[in-house]
Every structure is written in structure tokens, then in C-alpha cells.
Image: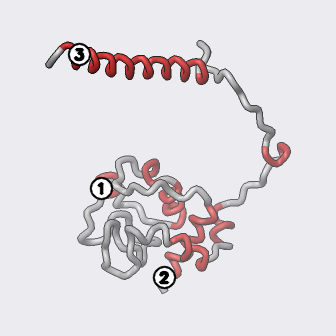
Amino acid sequence: MDTMTLTKASAGFLGAFLVFLLGKWAAEGLYHMDSHGEASYVIEVEEAGGGEEVAEVSFDELYAAADPAKGEKVFKKCSACHKLEDGANSTGPYLYGVVDRPIASVAGFGYSGALTAMADTAWTPEELDAFLTKPSSYAKGTSMSFAGLKKQKDRVNLIAYLQGLDG
């Protein structure tokens, strides 16, 4: 390798490094946090609803008013990994008869240790609601990678749909 090639390669590397450092310096200037951990630019937003309190509705009231037809639409999010037919396991266990069935009780399905440790508990509507909110928080270490359903109405509609499948 001659001197000119070595010089060009070094200049290219050092030029790229200089661009990186200048970009880092500019980003720190734009997004700098002061020593107290507060953002350098704060956007103030009014509270939604004008500060009025929203009355909480109990799970039982929501579940009593659940719409299984809407739950069938919510189930489409689950259908990638779960089947409804009795005994038809997929990536996840089949969900026919899941409501009030003991947790981790489907024969032939390999549950994670987080759910097998809960085998003495049943999938009551309340337990399913808690699980479907965020599975990884309900059963730490579960192999279910689904993020959860944020809206409680979606969860109760889905649970009502699944319960209606039992006949």
C-alpha cells in the first residue's frame, strides 16, 4: 500500500469521525437536560375534561353490559396465536372453554413456568381481565409476547365472547 492510499483512508476515517462528533455536539445542544433532570423545553398541557372527576365503573357492571359481537372483533388480535376449536393448540393454547378453566390446564401444551405455577387458579372473568391488561405484568416470565389490551371495554367484550363459545 502506498502513502497516498494510506493518507486517503486516514482522511476518510477522520472525516467521518469529525462528522460524528459534530452531530453529537449539535444533538446535545438541542436535547440537553440540566443537572436537575428537567427538560430544557417544557410543553404545558391542560388537563383533559376540565379537571372533572370521571366516575369509575366496576368490572361487574362492565361485564354485565359486555357485547360478545364486539368481542369477536377483538379476538382477531388473538387469532394469530390462538384457535377456538377444542383441542386445537397453536402457538398458544386453544381458547374454547377458557373462562373458568384452571390456568395452564390444556393437555399437551407447553406452558411457561410463570403460568404452571398458577395452576391452582382458574381463568375467571376477573383473572382474564387482569391477564389481558398486560400479560407480562400478570405472570412475570410468561412466554406470551402480546402487549395486552389497554381498553377495559375491549377486554370485557372479548371475555364475554369467549364465555359465549362454551354454549
CA gap, disc 2 and disc 3 = 77 Å
* Tag 2 residue: 165
Q: Which one is in front in this view, the residue at disc 3 or the one at disc 1?
A: 3
Q: Which residue is mark 3?
A: 4
Q: Amino acid at mark 2?
A: Leu
Q: Residue furthest left?
A: 1
| Mark closer to the chain start, 2 or 1 | 1
**2 and 3 marks in contact (CB < 8 Å):** no
Q: What residue is rendered at 68% in x and 60% in y?
A: 58
Residue 84 vertical placement versus 32 (above, below): below
Amino acid type at image mark 1: Ser
Label 3: few (<14), some (14–19) or many (≥20) C-alpha neighbours in 10 Å? few
Residue visible at 35% across and 81% down in the picture: 86
Give the distance between the C-alpha atoms of the residues marked 3 and 1, in whole angstroms: 61 Å
**Residue at 55% across, 70% down:** 74
The percent coordinates of residue 34 (x first, y second) are 61, 15
**Residue 143 in the image: x percent, y percent?**
34, 54
Direction from residue 152 to residue 104 in the image, left or right: left
Give SS at disc 2.
loop
Q: Secondary structure at mark 1?
A: loop
